[in-house]
């Protein structure tokens, strides 16, 4: 396969998962990164990616990445970077894709972006529809990998699972590798995926159920401790609003057909699958 896909955020979680999956599938990848000399960019280059130095706020870098590309994977950091204008950069990618005649853009939005809490992503979704770019919209749920990052907002710390989700709330999760798989499917099978919006969920569990799965995977008890929403708000207002939406029950009736997602991608992982695949190994350093 000799076609080029431009991947934004290529040294981040989602962009990296997509870039490596595309390289494995034989695509040529142009990888946008702010840090071309960093370890993540060097690893991508070693795997065969063409590194494009620049940021989402750099129109010249976007032009270099999009020009001549068959496809684009567009992802934006959202609440982790409150100083950046996610809607503006998302629209900028869309404009460049339209200008250069990109055959297929895959936009990574967020679960139930049309229900509030993710206003910038929903604004970009509407803009993509308005200008008519050939697009597939992926709406990932919470990443399973977030349980084992250095984020101060959610995850396993000092032997316990801590999030702001209420114990009775069933939260949806997806593995990063599965986001990469769906992006690759959409780009490889445009006739099937173009024009579709997919809510990406591999599993749906309450926090105590998550803790129980983790405990079984590592062979020791990991309790669940709910952190106060106001404590989370002091760290990140947008994360706090997201958890308030989850706890309100407003997402309980999201129509996610996990069986259909698994038909499209038979390797779609449950949390238990992900723990066996790599999660348990990633968890252990955080258990104290």
Image (cartoon, rainbow, N blue to C red):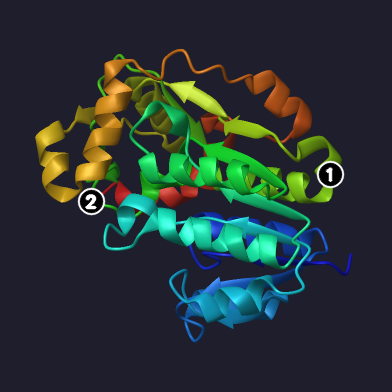
Residue at horizontal 49%, vertical 18%?
Answer: 254
Is 223 placed above or below 63 here?
A: above
Separation (CA) of disc 2 from disc 1 = 38 Å
Does the rendering let one see residue 16? no
Does the rendering let one see residue 272? yes
N-terminal label among 2 and 1: 2
Identify the mark at residue 168; answer none if there is no mark. none
Is 98 placed above or below 162 here?
A: below
Residue at horizontal 52%, vertical 63%?
Answer: 92
Q: Looking at this rendering, what residue extends furthest in the front direction? A: 130
Decide: few, some or many residues near mark 1? Use Cα within 10 Å; few <14, some 14-19, many ≥20. Answer: few
Where is mark 1, residue-wise? Answer: 189
Foreground label between 2 and 1: 1
Residue at horizontal 64%, vertical 79%?
Answer: 64
Q: Residue 169, image x and y in percent?
A: 33, 17
Can you tell which quarter of the image residue 224 is in?
A: top left
Q: Nearer the viewer, residue 99 or 237?
A: 99
Q: Nearer the viewer, residue 218 or 148?
A: 148
Is 147 placed above or below 112 here?
A: below
In-image side of 22 versus 115 (left or right) = right
Q: Looking at this rendering, what residue extends furthest in the right direction? A: 1
Where is mark 2, residue-wise? Answer: 152
Q: Nearer the viewer, residue 32 or 125?
A: 125
Is 96 placed above or below 52 here?
A: above
In-image side of 169 versus 233 (left or right) = right
């Amino acid at each position: 396969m000799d076609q080029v896909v431009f991947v934004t955020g290529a040294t981040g979680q989602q962009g990296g998962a997509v870039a490596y999956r595309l390289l494995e599938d034989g695509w040529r990848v142009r990888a946008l990164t702010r840090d071309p000399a960093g370890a993540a960019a060097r690893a991508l280059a070693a795997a065969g990616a063409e590194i494009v130095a620049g940021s989402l706020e750099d129109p010249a870098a976007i032009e270099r990445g999009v020009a001549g590309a068959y496809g684009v994977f567009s992802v934006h950091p959202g609440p982790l970077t409150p100083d950046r204008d996610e809607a503006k950069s998302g629209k900028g990618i869309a404009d460049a894709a339209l200008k250069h005649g990109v055959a297929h853009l895959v936009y990574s939005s967020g679960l139930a972006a049309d229900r509030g809490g993710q206003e910038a992503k929903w604004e970009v979704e509407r803009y993509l529809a308005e200008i008519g770019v050939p697009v597939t919209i992926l709406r990932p749920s919470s990443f399973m990998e977030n349980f084992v990052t250095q984020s101060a907002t959610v995850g396993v710390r000092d032997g316990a699972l801590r999030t702001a989700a209420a114990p009775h709330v069933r939260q949806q999760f997806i593995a990063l590798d599965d986001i990469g798989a769906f992006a690759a499917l959409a780009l490889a099978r445009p006739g099937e995926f173009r024009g579709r919006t997919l809510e990406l969920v591999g599993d749906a569990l309450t926090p105590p159920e998550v803790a129980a799965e983790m405990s079984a995977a590592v062979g020791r008890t990991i309790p669940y401790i709910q952190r106060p929403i106001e404590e989370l708000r002091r760290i990140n207002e947008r994360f706090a609003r997201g958890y308030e939406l989850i706890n309100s029950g407003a997402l309980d009736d999201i129509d996610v057909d996990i069986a259909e997602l698994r038909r499209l991608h038979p390797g779609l992982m449950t949390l238990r699958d992900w723990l066996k695949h790599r999660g348990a190994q990633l968890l252990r350093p955080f258990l104290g």
